[in-house]
Amino acid sequence: MSLDVTTPVTEVETAVPTPVGELAAIISAPHTSNAPRPGLVLIDGSGDGDRHHWGSLPQWLVEAGAIVLRHDKPGCGGSPGHWLDQTLEDRARESLAALEVLRSHPATAGEPVGLYGISQGGWVALLAASLEPDAVDFVICDSGPGTTPAAQEHERLAVALRTAGHDAASIAQAMAWVQERLDRLRRGDTEREILTEQARYAGESWYDTVRFPYDTVELLRFLRGVMDFDPTTVMPSVSCPVLALFGGADALIPVAASVAAFAEHLPQNPRNGLAVFPRADHGLFIAGPQQGIPRRAQLAPMYLPTVAAFLRDRAADAASTDGAPFVQGPVHIGG
């Protein structure tokens, strides 16, 4: 299961059963190999999530040694329901259902099957592993914050304001509204009341930066339901091996606080791994898209080999009770 950049991939449509109906899904597997491999269920981040909109990541993860399942969020890709009606626990239960679909596939027979959560999906993966520890063999968190959504968004918006060049007074005013918006949600103000108050700032230079995506009743309602989820409260219950991956140049999440949270709150497990890739962004790329340069070549160089090594060790664990540890404690990987 070493990294193979020439792996031809076969994709098969399937479905994930959930309370809102069946969510369309795709399983990606090597075209020419019949040997079972570890399974990965991809868990999307925030916003819409269509099974066809994952780009090349499923291919890359197959190359790293996995069988990969990705599925629609409710209300996306023609699937029923709507993701704005979900809680994080709803998403976790949905991910556990997807895991069972993948575990029943012949390509994962006898192999460990785990969750691969990206950004918000990292919270979902940890929550799922805490809800049903016996069902999840391992977790990979890709740019998954170790803070609450409220703290993560506070950091993201502050960085966005500084990047946009606003002066200190404007940033202070904008962040005061960001905090007030959260406080109003916590104390039970209606979404329409909050939107009316928010509109008072429409003439401010910083307004568009902090308004989106919190500019509809539905999105504010969703934020109210998830904003105070604290991943450190579920980390101690995650008994399976966890690999946490971060980009050192990620402007969307508080990387240092997240690294500290994973290191402190996960159970001490020599099979856990934690890596920060210098210069990598939220998607673990070291550069933005450029014409003529394959996107894969812009990934942090050791990202996929790190995932491949973790998968290989999880397969070894399944084959033997004496599986070797992967990485203990936080590390920085050059590149």
Image (cartoon, rainbow, N blue to C red):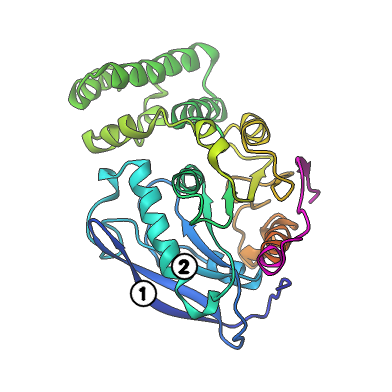
Other residues around mark 2 within 10 Å, as few (<14) / some (14–19) / many (≥20): many
For the point 37% across and 42% down, the residue is 88
Please give the name of the residue rendered at 41% of the width and 69% of the height, measured from the top-left corner. 101
Position of residue 307 measured from the top left corner of the image (x, y, whole percent):
67, 59
Residue at 64% x, 80% y: name it.
7
Left or right: 216 with respect to 49? left
Please give the range of residues in magenta.
315-335
Residue 53 visible here: no
- Which residue is identified by label 1? 14
**61 sits to left or right of 86:** right
Q: Compared with residue 283, is residue 294 higher up or lower down, i.e. above or below? A: below
Snapshot quadrant of residue 228: top left
Where, by quadrant of the figure, is residue 22 drawn?
A: bottom left
Could you tell me which secondary element the residue under label 2 belongs to?
A: strand
Q: Residue furthest right?
A: 334
For residue 190, which numbered disc appears in the image?
none
Residue type of the residue flagged with mark 2 = Leu
Residue shown at the point (75%, 61%) measured from the top left: 323
Label 1 vs 2, first from the N-terminus: 1
Numbered circle sitting on residue 69: 2
Residue closer to the observer: 117 or 39: 39
Position of 98 compared to 235: left or right?
left
Q: Position of residue 259 (x, y in %)?
A: 66, 35
What is the distance, in whole Å, between disc 1 and disc 2 at their CAs?
9 Å
Element marked by disc 1: strand
Question: Of all residues shown, which one is farthest toward the bottom?
Answer: 32
User: Where residue 331 sits in the image (x, y, percent)?
Assistant: 78, 42
Residue 263 shown in magenta: no
Q: Is residue 90 visible?
A: yes
Membership of 316 in magenta stretch: yes
Determine whether, in the image, residue 4 is placed left or right of residue 85.
right
Q: Nearer the viewer, residue 291 or 294?
A: 294
